[in-house]
Structures are given as C-alpha cells and as structure tokens.
Amino acid sequence: MRKLIYLIVAALLLISCRNQNNDKSITKKTNNMKKVLFVLTSHDELGNTGEKTGFWVEEFAAPYYFLKDKGIAITIASPKGGQPPIDPKSELPDFQTDATKRFDQDSKTQEKLKNSISLSEIKAEDYDAIFYPGGHGPLWDLANDKNSISLIEAFYNQNKPVAAVCHAPAIFKNTQNTEGAPLVKGKKVTGFSNSEEAAVQLTDIVPFLVEDMLMNNGAEYSKRDDWTPYALEDGLIITGQNPASSELVAEKLLHQLQ
C-alpha cells in the first residue's frame, strides 16, 4: 500500500513538472513574438467632393493576414482611436480579394478595428515595426499628424522598420532624420503614382500628389505600370506603389523581422 502511494505521488509530481515546463515554453514563445503596429487614418472626407474616403480595405487586410498567419502580433491604432473609416469604394465587388473576403467574415478583427488605440497612447519601444495601409485618408491626417510623425521618427531611430503602401507614403511628407533632413532623402521609394491618381480622377482633389511629394523630399522615386505590384526596401524604409503591392510590402517587412 505504501509503495502504491509513493508511485501515485511520483506520478503527480511528474505531471506537475511537465505542466510547468509547458507554461514556461508558452511564456517564452509569447515573449519572443514580434509585434507590429498598424496605423490607419481617421479622416473620412474626400476633399470638398462631399464623398467619403478612409483606408483601403485590401491594403489593410492583405498585409494584416499575411503577418498574422506568420505568428506576428498586431496592434491597430489611428489618430483619433476607435473605428477608422473605410473607403466605401474599396468595398465594391470589383475590389474584393481573398483577404478582403476573409476580413468580411472575421468579426474578431472587425471588433479589434472598431476599438483601435489612439496614437497618443502608443510608444515605439513596445513594438518591432510599424505599418501604414493606404487609402486617400492619410493625405489629410497622417501626413501632418504630430503623434504619427514622432512615432515614425522614433521607430526609425530605434532601428525598426517603417512600412507604407499606396497613398500611405504620404506619412513621409514631414518626417525628418536626426540631421533635420527629410527621412526619405536619398532613399529608394515608391508610392501611388501621378498617373494612377489621374486614372481615378482625383489629381485636383487631393491636397498633394504622393509621387511629387516624395521627389520634392529628395527621395529616389520609381514606379511600374499603373496597378502593377511593386515594392521597394531601402534600409528600414519599405514602400509599395498601389493596393496590389500590399502583400509584397508585408513580405519585405517580415523578412526584416526574422
């Protein structure tokens, strides 16, 4: 009987040790998980047209799921916090992809998006990289938002990647390096082209053209044919030309995080 008790106690101790080791493994895995901050626009007015704008769904969904499926922890933020506005045109049937369809069925991510964190509450040291999806909204708010500008400069100075796609390279309009020069000066970058803006008939509506702004800031801007996937990586700065380039930007960002 005494021997049986000893065996039971030994078995219980063994199970307890295994559980503790599993807990340690889970904790270690969580601590090692890379964290990326997604920043979306809070602006929803398309100039003086009376139409709505915001972020382009594909430019959020494609990189979001690409990184999430690779084990990246993603936090969503915006200048005002709460629900970032979705550009209604990006929800039209012609612009649907596997990623946008997945988002439409993903109530958990929709709720997460609805409760985006205000940029004023974000600290660069809590994340490993920052990603900006596009849409026309960033041209009006993120290009000039002081919290966004400070975050981008902080990420860059902490040797962390800064990624932006389509119209989102507008974020580099007012960002500077430690010497006070434009952050993209001398950098190989891309972004929504002048010809693509003309194709959607918004050249005279937007506050500035992404292509022109990047070149005026001293960047080495390049592009491919309209709507062709194209992404560039120059050091910590990763940019994509248009919605079709969203996942390419995410791929380059993941490579830097590995």
Image: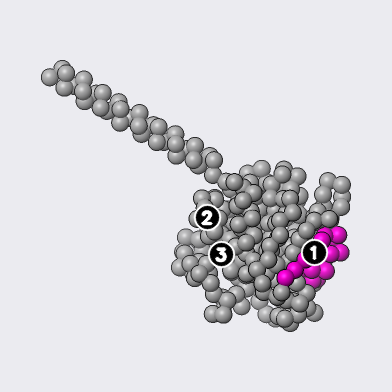
For the point 49% across and 40% down, the residue is 29
Question: In the visual, does 118 lie left or right of 102?
Answer: right
Residue denoted by label 2: 68
Circle 3 residue:
61
Q: Which of the labelled discs sits on residue 92, or is there none? A: none
Residue 118 in view here: no
Q: Residues within 10 Å of mark 1 (few under 14, many from 20)?
A: many
Question: Disc 1 to disc 3, how far (Cα)?
Answer: 26 Å
Residue 81 falls inside the magenta stretch: no
Q: Nearer the viewer, mark 1 or mark 2?
A: 1
Count every numbered label the image shows and give the total.
Answer: 3
The stretch in magenta equals: 208-224
Residue 182, compared with residue 87, is above or below; it is above
Q: Amino acid at mark 3?
A: Ala
Which residue is at the front of the view, 92 or 114?
A: 92
Is any atom of residue 96 visible in this view?
yes
Q: Residues within 10 Å of mark 3 (few under 14, many from 20)?
A: many
Residue farthest toward the top in the current orientation of the protein? 2
Q: Tell me the number on the disc at residue 221.
A: 1
Residue at horizontal 15%, vertical 17%? 2
Disc 1 from disc 2: Cα separation: 30 Å
